[in-house]
Image (tube, helix red, strand yellow):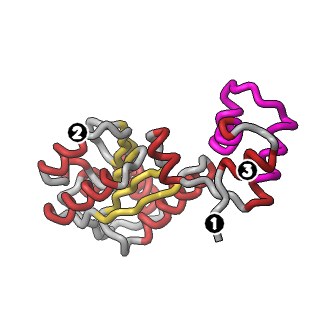
């Protein structure tokens, strides 16, 4: 069965194909003069015909993919899944989808990861990995990117920092107030900035 087109929607709604395009692409809310009655007719025709917007074609026209790339260092750590869940929820509310990639901290795989994200034409990148820990080849690719980039930990991009040293002081103060004097600290990867911050 032939998939319905914008032309089919336009004929059923009694409007031009351009009007259908404006409505389904959300341009009617950006100053294009389309009445509520016309918009409603188009939406009803879309529903009746089962018309679905071609996201690929839409992305080619607008340059927007409505996709955010997220790089994780490892998949197994539940800490990252909690953060990813928050990212996914916020992205979904804003009409975006999330493309997940694993950097694995290995040069060859990380290179492939960045290239894959670039080839998918994402609109932006979130790096859940310390920028300074990445291989120089990956840094160069990211620095050359035209995409908005937000990273976890200090970097030349927009970034989010946690005050680990303050958190450690609060934890130690609490334990000392309870009378504990022999305290053992089991740390994670000490080469990373986050691990070092917890020790100072």
Q: Which residue is mark 2?
A: 143
Q: Earlier in the sequence, mark 2 or mark 3?
A: 3
Q: Is residue 153 above or below residue 72?
A: above
**Vertical relation: 155 (above or below) 91:** above
Indicate the quadrant where residue 34 lies: top right
Q: Distance from label 2 to label 3 (Cα)?
A: 44 Å
Q: Which residue is at the front of the view, 137 or 10? A: 10
**Which numbered marker is on residue 2?**
1
Q: Is residue 5 left or right of residue 195?
A: right
Element class at badge 3 = helix
- Residues at circles 2 and 3 in contact by the CB criterion of under 8 Å: no
Label 1 CA crowd tier, 10 Å (few <14, some 14–19, many 20+): few
Tell which tag, 2 or 3, sits nearer the viewer.
Answer: 3
Q: Position of residue 142 (x, y in %)?
A: 24, 44
Mark carried by residue 9: 3
Report x, y in % for residue 120: 36, 55
Q: CA distance from mark 1 to mark 2?
A: 45 Å
Q: Main secondary structure of the magenta part?
A: helix
Answer whether residue 200 is visible to the viewer in this image. Answer: no
Examine the image and state in which quarter residue 33 appears: top right
As helix, strand or loop, the secondary structure at mark 1 comes to loop
Residue farthest to the bottom, as pictured: 76
From which residue to which does the magenta span run? 19-45
Q: Judge from the rendering whether residue 84 lies leftward or rightward of residue 11; answer left or right.
A: left
Mark 2 Cα shell of 10 Å, populated few (<14), some (14-19), many (≥20): few
| 97 inside magenta stretch | no
């Amino acid at each position: 069965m032939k998939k319905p087109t914008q032309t089919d929607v336009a004929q059923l709604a009694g409007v031009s194909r351009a009007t259908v395009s404006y409505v389904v692409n959300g341009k009617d809310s950006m100053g294009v003069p389309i009445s509520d009655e016309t918009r409603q007719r188009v939406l009803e025709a879309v529903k009746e015909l089962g018309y679905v917007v071609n996201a690929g074609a839409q992305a080619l026209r607008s340059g927007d993919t409505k996709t955010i790339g997220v790089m994780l260092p490892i998949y197994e750590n539940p800490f990252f899944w909690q953060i990813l869940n928050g990212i996914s929820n916020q992205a979904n509310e804003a009409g975006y989808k999330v493309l997940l990639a694993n950097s694995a901290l290995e040069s060859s795989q990380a290179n492939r990861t960045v290239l894959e994200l670039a080839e998918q034409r994402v609109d932006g990148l979130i790096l859940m990995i310390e920028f300074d820990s990445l291989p120089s080849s990956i840094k160069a690719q990211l620095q050359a990117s035209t995409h908005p980039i937000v990273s976890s930990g200090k970097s030349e991009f927009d970034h989010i920092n946690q005050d680990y040293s303050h958190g450690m002081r609060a934890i130690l103060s609490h334990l000392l107030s309870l009378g504990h004097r022999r305290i053992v600290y089991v740390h994670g990867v000490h080469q990373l900035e986050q691990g070092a911050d917890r020790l100072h």
